[in-house]
Image (cartoon, rainbow, N blue to C red):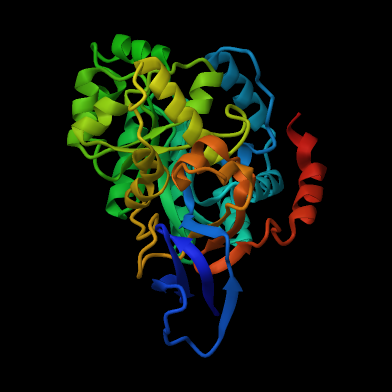
Amino acid sequence: MGAILLKNIVAEGVVSDVLLDGGLIGRIVPAGEQISLPEEVEVVECEGKTLMPGLINMHTHAGMALMRGVGEDIPFHEWIDRIWVLEKNLDEEYVYYATKVACLEMIKTGTTTFNDQYWYMPMAYKAASELGLRAALSYVFLDKNDPEESERQKVQALQMYEASREWADTAQLVISIHAIYSVREPMILWAADFARQRGLKIHIHVSETEKEVADCMAQHGGMSPVEYLDSLGILGPDVIAAHTLWLSDKDIEILAKRGVTCVHNVNSNLKLASGYRFRYNELRDAGANVCLGTDGCASSNNLDMLETMKTSAIVQKAWRNDPAAMPLNELIAMATSNAAGALGLNAGKIEEGALADLLIIDTDNHNFLSPGTFEANLVYSAHSDCVDSVICNGRFIMRNRVVPGEKEVLAQARRVLNRIG
Ligand SMILES: [Zn+2]
């Protein structure tokens, strides 16, 4: 892998030269300072541009990228039933191209890593690695209370685990337990044990809707989903809990005590009318790790993390009647370093030795022409087309907004588009 020298780029507010080597950030020095360069190095002039860590989408279903708009204006339980009907017709080729479209969109909107939960996971691995993205990819347990299906999934999980041992280091296998309402208790226990014996993270939807919480309390002696999962010994620092929207004070205390990562998916929650009072301040103050996600395109319709950041902050400010409810530095951390920590990656920061997963932001436009900070302009003023170039694992995966092979991906996706309709 060739080294890259980003010349005259603003890094942490200072015009710098940044050397990327071996997939890592090698050196960061003030622009023009002499540094020893590797023999083969590509020098890229970046005047007028700013370097920032790549964004990390902590909850998505990339294979749903061709399901935009399939369930508009209906309640969550009708929406999920509709999705499950469509998903009966999925095949490998469909998921492969749908994930490629998702990867394309993520790259163009500044995401360098995504935490995914979908079917035909080897296809997601193929798609993500071909486009150069880093990914946490799930084997998904979802037995819909069918013991025969549980047995089939146990066998398949083991096969997927064996296959994942051959993966490049840009991908990690995660075990997903879809949700407490879609997976039987013995399966939940088995899946968590399977993950922990192998040091894999666990990804699960938790307390997404008010109905999920009410149903759980009725079924499990008054316990909320968080209390129920804790009673099973499932919660720990290796757990990534998507949504965590309907939380009691006790739930928050448990999530923080167990070191669970909570992923806020504001656009999906708003659009499915699941709720909007995500208790960010309480989770943060209790010490929980909070990150951001888009959810899949069937609910949030896009995978744009900058849009997610802006909506998260303005909704939080509005419902709490507090403009300081989600400060910019915390918002950026949620989309970068908090997420990297949850996935065990030395990323999400501009630091020598960290993974070179980076964005080059074009600030030479009206959105950034202000005395405001880069972060303020990025989140509240700009759109994701300010992402000029994307580097993942030390190599360009988008340059000057061009992703190699984009047209071909769209053409192939168009071909499989109606397979599920
Ligand atoms: Zn989801």
**Whether residue 180 can be seen here:** yes
Residue lying farthest to the bottom in this orientation: 39
Q: Position of residue 282 (x, y in %)?
A: 25, 25
Q: Position of residue 323 (x, y in %)?
A: 37, 24
Which of 76/306 is in front?
Answer: 306
382 on left or right of 224: right
411 versus 239 height, above or below: below
38 on left or right of 99: left
Q: How many numbered tags mark residues here?
A: 0
Give the quarter of the image for residue 27. bottom left
**Residue drawn 45% across the image and 25% down it:** 314
Q: Quadrant of the C terminus?
A: top right
31 versus 128 height, above or below: below
Q: Position of residue 292 (x, y in %)?
A: 43, 37
Which of 353/158 is in front?
Answer: 353
328 on left or right of 392: left
Q: Position of residue 369 (x, y in %)?
A: 57, 45
Which of 97/390 is in front?
Answer: 390
97 versus 304 height, above or below: below
1 versus 191 height, above or below: below
**Whether residue 232 can be seen here:** no
**Residue drawn 32% across the image and 23% down it:** 279
Q: Quadrant of the N terminus?
A: bottom right
**Residue drawn 40% across the image and 13% down it:** 210
Give the quarter of the image for residue 322. top left
Give the quarter of the image for residue 70. top right
**Residue drawn 41% across the image and 48% down it:** 336
